[in-house]
Image: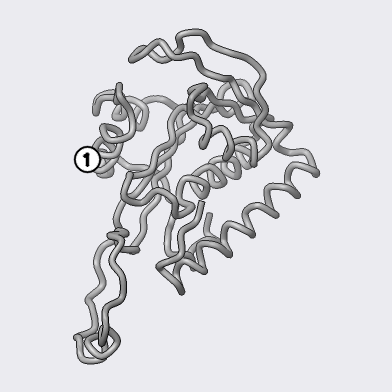
Amino acid sequence: MDELDSLPVRVEPMTISDLADVLNIERLAYPSPWSARAYEYELRYNEMAHYFVARTNEATSNGSHNKPFDWLKRMFRPAPTASPPILVGYVGYWLMAGEAHISTIAVHPQFRGRGYGELLLVSTLEDATKRGSHVATLEVRVSNSSAQQLYTKYGFEKVGLRKAYYSDNNEDAFIMTTPPLGAGQYQTKLLRLKAALELRLRERQSSPQLRTA
């Protein structure tokens, strides 16, 4: 993940001090959010668990448009002081018997569509590969077509169905799994997709009005 330091977003390990922000996103993203105690257990005691967060200095997108003479106002406006990075998303997976099971992934609603969720997924696949995982797998709601498109983009295939998997509405879940992570063909695909993502994120940095998938 160090090679992504020049991007407007950084992925790094989750810590206990991140939990307030994580739980805020959790409540916004999921109808049945995990508790603080569940995350504390994962971070402190579950040796199979690996969690990461995404931070950015990018501002929220408020849909505002440039007004006449905005450029002139900016010339005389004092330079903004640096603000601490904002936690905008997180991901977690369990490494069990050579399989990386992605247990959760979420991005704050105000920061969706900027490529942050995709970056979290890429970082997870890279970390799992470094730790010796053979494949990555996850469950996804059958109605969540946008997430399925992202996972398919990264080689996940539907290999099964869990009936009534989600307790909030008894919705089914597709089981999706990657090809072997260490295979040369998959690593070439991952590097190509990562390079394209980095380019889009850098374009966002130079042109904040751009939207990414």
Residue position marked by numbered label 1 in the rendering = 20
Hey, what amino acid is under mark 1? Ala
**Does 82 sit left or right of 176 as displayed?**
left
Mark 1 Cα shell of 10 Å, populated few (<14), some (14-19), many (≥20): few
Residue 74, placed above or below residue 108: below
Tell which of 136 and 96 is nearer to you.
136
**Does 14 sit left or right of 125 as displayed?**
left
Q: Position of residue 135 (x, y in %)?
A: 66, 29
* Badge 1 element: helix
Residue 13, placed above or below residue 95: below
**Does 164 sit left or right of 192 as displayed?**
left
**Residue at 33% across, 63% down:** 57
**Does 188 sit left or right of 44 as displayed?**
right
**Residue at 80% across, 44% down:** 184
Tell which of 11 and 66 is nearer to you.
66
Q: Position of residue 130 (x, y in %)?
A: 62, 42
Q: Which residue is situated farthest in the top direction here?
A: 163
Q: How many marks?
A: 1
Q: Tell me where residue 133 sits by quadrant.
A: top right
**Residue at 36% across, 59% down:** 56
**Residue at 68% across, 48% down:** 190
Which color scheme did the rendering employ for the protein?
one colour
Q: Position of residue 129 (x, y in %)?
A: 64, 39
Q: Position of residue 92 (x, y in %)?
A: 45, 34
Residue 172, placed above or below residue 184: above
